Image (cartoon, grey):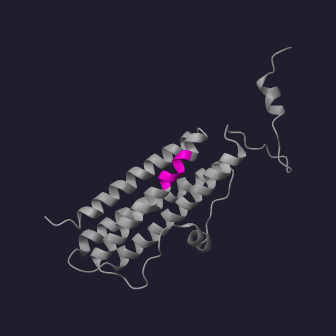
């Protein structure tokens, strides 16, 4: 039997009802759906933490104002820059990314920011808990990514974990008395 050329194989690619080639990246549909669903929770957690951090940046008061105001700005900027790669990974897996407050509220593991701004040190405590919670969400996705040999998702998770764990440490250091 003659060898099948790459062009022949491409011509036999499965297509959707609309004629678009079906996703065939080496991860089956079920695994892609499970990873995308989990990444949607990570996106919701990241977005919620972003909003809380930005809120605290605007509303921090007290003797640590300058330090915390600048620190919170660095943190919310980093979180803002993390949102798009997470959403785009979900899209790369063939699923739609959540994008409404209602969806984020349903998917997040984080509590919403308090209605009244807490004290500066309470803001720090809330953000520590938030970063650790997002780290746990990211860590929970690893088994799915590893099972599916989804290296791009594993790489994204590794990057996110490093940021959240380091940020929690830095925030926690503000609360330690010498």
Instruction: Residue 135: give x, y in percent of width and height.
Output: 43, 56
Look at the image and tell me in which quarter the C terminus lies. Answer: bottom left
Look at the image and tell me in which quarter the N terminus lies. Answer: top right
Toward the viewer: 77 or 135? 135
Residue 150 in sight from this viewpoint: no
Instruction: Residue 22: give x, y in percent of width and height.
Output: 77, 44
Instruction: Residue 174: give x, y in percent of width and height.
Output: 23, 66
The residue lying at 66 percent from left, 48 percent from top is 32
The residue lying at 37 percent from left, 75 percent from top is 56
Instruction: Classify 85 as above or below 127.
Output: above
Stretch of the chain drawn in magenta: 138-143
The residue lying at 72 percent from left, 46 percent from top is 29
Toward the viewer: 150 or 98? 150
Instruction: Decide whether residue 142 is among the magenta residues.
Output: yes
Residue found at the far top of this picture: 1
Instruction: Classify 156 as above or below 72.
Output: above
Instruction: Decide whether residue 154 is among the magenta residues.
Output: no
The residue lying at 69 percent from left, 50 percent from top is 94
Instruction: Classify 1 as above or below 129.
Output: above
Residue 175 in sight from this viewpoint: yes
């Amino acid at each position: 039997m003659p060898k099948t050329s790459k062009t022949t194989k491409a011509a036999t690619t499965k297509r959707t009802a609309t004629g678009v080639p079906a996703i065939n990246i080496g991860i089956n549909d079920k695994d892609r759906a499970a990873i995308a669903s989990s990444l949607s929770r990570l996106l919701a957690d990241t977005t919620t933490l972003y909003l809380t951090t930005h809120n605290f940046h605007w509303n921090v008061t007290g003797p640590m104002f300058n330090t915390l105001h600048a620190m919170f700005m660095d943190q919310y900027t980093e979180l803002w820059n993390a949102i798009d790669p997470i959403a785009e990974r979900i899209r790369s897996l063939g699923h739609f990314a959540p994008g409404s407050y209602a969806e984020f509220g349903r998917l997040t593991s984080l509590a919403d920011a308090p209605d009244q701004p807490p004290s500066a040190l309470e803001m720090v405590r809330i953000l520590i808990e938030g970063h650790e919670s997002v780290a746990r969400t990211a860590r929970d996705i690893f088994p799915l990514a590893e099972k599916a040999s989804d290296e791009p998702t594993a790489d994204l998770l590794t990057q996110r974990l490093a940021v959240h764990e380091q940020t929690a440490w830095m925030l926690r250091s503000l609360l330690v008395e010498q």
